Image: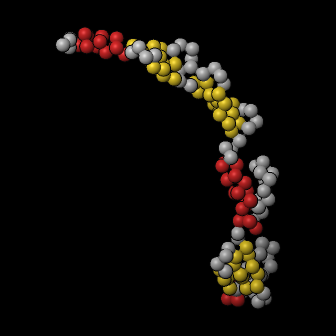
Amino acid sequence: HTSVDGDVIVIDATRSAITDNGDGTYTIVNQDGDNVVINTNANTSVYDNTNSGLSSGNVQDAIDELVTTINTGSGVRLNDNGDGTVSLVAEDGTVLGTVNKSSLTDNTDGTYTFDNGNGSPVTINVISDVADNIVNQGDIY
Protein backbone atom coordinates (compact mmCIF):
# COMPACT_ATOMS: atom_id res chain seq x y z
CA HIS A 1 0.00 0.00 0.00
CA THR A 2 1.24 3.48 -0.80
CA SER A 3 0.23 6.17 1.70
CA VAL A 4 -0.79 9.70 0.74
CA ASP A 5 2.71 11.01 1.37
CA GLY A 6 4.24 8.32 -0.89
CA ASP A 7 5.50 5.89 1.74
CA VAL A 8 5.13 2.23 0.84
CA ILE A 9 3.57 0.17 3.62
CA VAL A 10 3.66 -3.61 3.35
CA ILE A 11 0.70 -5.38 4.91
CA ASP A 12 1.07 -9.14 5.19
CA ALA A 13 -2.57 -10.24 5.39
CA THR A 14 -1.58 -13.90 5.54
CA ARG A 15 -0.07 -13.48 9.02
CA SER A 16 -3.24 -12.13 10.68
CA ALA A 17 -5.91 -14.30 12.28
CA ILE A 18 -9.18 -13.34 13.96
CA THR A 19 -10.89 -15.60 16.49
CA ASP A 20 -14.40 -15.04 17.86
CA ASN A 21 -14.09 -15.92 21.55
CA GLY A 22 -17.90 -16.30 21.85
CA ASP A 23 -18.21 -13.76 24.66
CA GLY A 24 -18.24 -10.50 22.74
CA THR A 25 -14.47 -10.44 22.46
CA TYR A 26 -12.27 -11.20 19.48
CA THR A 27 -8.61 -12.15 19.46
CA ILE A 28 -6.50 -10.89 16.60
CA VAL A 29 -3.01 -12.18 16.03
CA ASN A 30 -1.11 -9.26 14.57
CA GLN A 31 1.78 -9.38 12.10
CA ASP A 32 4.29 -9.67 14.92
CA GLY A 33 2.50 -12.74 16.30
CA ASP A 34 1.10 -10.87 19.31
CA ASN A 35 -2.46 -11.52 20.52
CA VAL A 36 -4.66 -8.41 20.62
CA VAL A 37 -8.10 -8.75 22.27
CA ILE A 38 -10.90 -6.47 21.12
CA ASN A 39 -13.88 -6.28 23.48
CA THR A 40 -17.19 -5.29 21.81
CA ASN A 41 -19.41 -5.67 24.90
CA ALA A 42 -21.66 -2.68 25.64
CA ASN A 43 -20.22 -2.20 29.13
CA THR A 44 -16.77 -1.56 27.64
CA SER A 45 -17.92 0.86 24.94
CA VAL A 46 -17.49 4.46 26.05
CA TYR A 47 -20.64 6.60 25.98
CA ASP A 48 -20.51 10.39 25.67
CA ASN A 49 -23.27 11.67 27.95
CA THR A 50 -22.54 15.37 27.35
CA ASN A 51 -25.91 16.17 25.74
CA SER A 52 -28.17 13.35 26.94
CA GLY A 53 -28.55 14.28 30.60
CA LEU A 54 -27.67 10.70 31.53
CA SER A 55 -24.97 10.03 34.10
CA SER A 56 -23.72 6.81 32.47
CA GLY A 57 -20.26 6.60 31.00
CA ASN A 58 -20.63 3.40 28.95
CA VAL A 59 -23.25 2.05 26.55
CA GLN A 60 -24.57 -0.74 28.82
CA ASP A 61 -25.08 1.59 31.78
CA ALA A 62 -26.79 4.15 29.49
CA ILE A 63 -29.21 1.47 28.25
CA ASP A 64 -29.93 0.37 31.83
CA GLU A 65 -30.45 4.00 32.92
CA LEU A 66 -32.94 4.58 30.09
CA VAL A 67 -34.88 1.41 30.96
CA THR A 68 -35.08 2.49 34.61
CA THR A 69 -36.31 5.95 33.58
CA ILE A 70 -38.96 4.47 31.30
CA ASN A 71 -40.12 2.01 33.97
CA THR A 72 -40.53 4.81 36.53
CA GLY A 73 -42.78 6.88 34.27
CA SER A 74 -40.13 8.77 32.36
CA GLY A 75 -40.50 11.74 34.68
CA VAL A 76 -44.14 12.46 33.80
CA ARG A 77 -47.27 12.47 35.94
CA LEU A 78 -51.00 12.74 35.33
CA ASN A 79 -52.48 15.77 37.08
CA ASP A 80 -56.21 16.23 37.80
CA ASN A 81 -56.60 20.00 37.47
CA GLY A 82 -59.87 20.08 39.45
CA ASP A 83 -61.63 21.91 36.64
CA GLY A 84 -62.79 18.97 34.53
CA THR A 85 -59.42 18.57 32.81
CA VAL A 86 -56.46 16.25 33.22
CA SER A 87 -52.91 17.22 32.19
CA LEU A 88 -49.80 15.20 31.44
CA VAL A 89 -46.97 17.10 33.17
CA ALA A 90 -43.21 16.65 32.67
CA GLU A 91 -40.81 16.41 35.58
CA ASP A 92 -39.80 20.05 35.11
CA GLY A 93 -43.45 21.22 35.31
CA THR A 94 -44.02 21.61 31.56
CA VAL A 95 -47.60 20.70 30.61
CA LEU A 96 -47.33 18.22 27.73
CA GLY A 97 -51.06 18.10 27.01
CA THR A 98 -54.48 18.61 28.57
CA VAL A 99 -57.76 16.81 27.90
CA ASN A 100 -61.30 17.26 29.21
CA LYS A 101 -62.67 14.60 31.51
CA SER A 102 -66.20 13.39 30.87
CA SER A 103 -68.83 11.62 32.93
CA LEU A 104 -72.23 10.06 32.40
CA THR A 105 -74.61 10.16 35.37
CA ASP A 106 -77.80 8.07 35.65
CA ASN A 107 -80.36 10.45 37.20
CA THR A 108 -82.63 7.41 37.99
CA ASP A 109 -85.65 9.07 36.32
CA GLY A 110 -85.06 7.95 32.75
CA THR A 111 -82.58 10.74 32.12
CA TYR A 112 -78.80 10.74 31.94
CA THR A 113 -76.48 13.71 32.23
CA PHE A 114 -73.37 13.78 30.06
CA ASP A 115 -70.67 16.20 31.15
CA ASN A 116 -67.47 16.57 29.12
CA GLY A 117 -66.01 19.06 31.57
CA ASN A 118 -66.54 22.13 29.41
CA GLY A 119 -69.15 23.68 31.73
CA SER A 120 -72.16 22.76 29.57
CA PRO A 121 -73.53 19.36 30.67
CA VAL A 122 -76.23 17.80 28.48
CA THR A 123 -79.21 15.89 29.85
CA ILE A 124 -80.54 13.06 27.72
CA ASN A 125 -84.15 12.02 28.34
CA VAL A 126 -84.16 8.42 27.16
CA ILE A 127 -87.88 7.77 27.76
CA SER A 128 -88.92 10.94 25.96
CA ASP A 129 -86.47 10.34 23.10
CA VAL A 130 -87.67 6.75 22.59
CA ALA A 131 -91.36 7.75 22.79
CA ASP A 132 -90.84 10.64 20.36
CA ASN A 133 -89.06 8.33 17.96
CA ILE A 134 -91.92 5.81 18.05
CA VAL A 135 -94.53 8.54 17.51
CA ASN A 136 -92.53 10.08 14.65
CA GLN A 137 -92.21 6.71 12.97
CA GLY A 138 -95.93 6.00 13.28
CA ASP A 139 -95.24 2.83 15.21
CA ILE A 140 -97.78 3.30 18.00
CA TYR A 141 -99.12 -0.06 19.17
Position in image of residue 87 (x %, y %):
64, 29
Which quadrant of the structure image shows residue 4?
bottom right
Q: 32 or 83, which lies in front?
A: 83
Task: Please state the total of marks drawn on the protein image.
Answer: 0
Q: Is residue 10 visible?
A: no
Position in image of residue 6 (x %, y %):
79, 76
Which quadrant of the structure image shows residue 111?
top left
Residue depicted at 59% across the width and 27% down the height: 99
Residue depicted at 66% across the width and 49% down the height: 71
Task: Say how the picture is coloured.
Answer: secondary structure
In the image: residue 123, left or right of residue 81: left
Q: Is residue 44 above or below residue 108?
A: below
Which quadrant of the structure image shows residue 11?
bottom right
Looking at the rendering, in which quadrant would you find the N terminus? bottom right
In the displayed image of the protein, which residue is found farthest to the left? 141
Q: 45 or 71, which lies in front?
A: 71
Q: Is residue 45 above or below residue 131?
A: below
Q: Is residue 119 visible?
A: yes
Q: 73 or 32, which lies in front?
A: 73
Residue depicted at 76% across the width and 89% down the height: 33
Residue depicted at 73% across the width and 56% down the height: 62
Position in image of residue 66 (x %, y %):
70, 52
Looking at the rendering, in which quadrant would you find the C terminus? top left
In the image: residue 107, left or right of residue 21: left
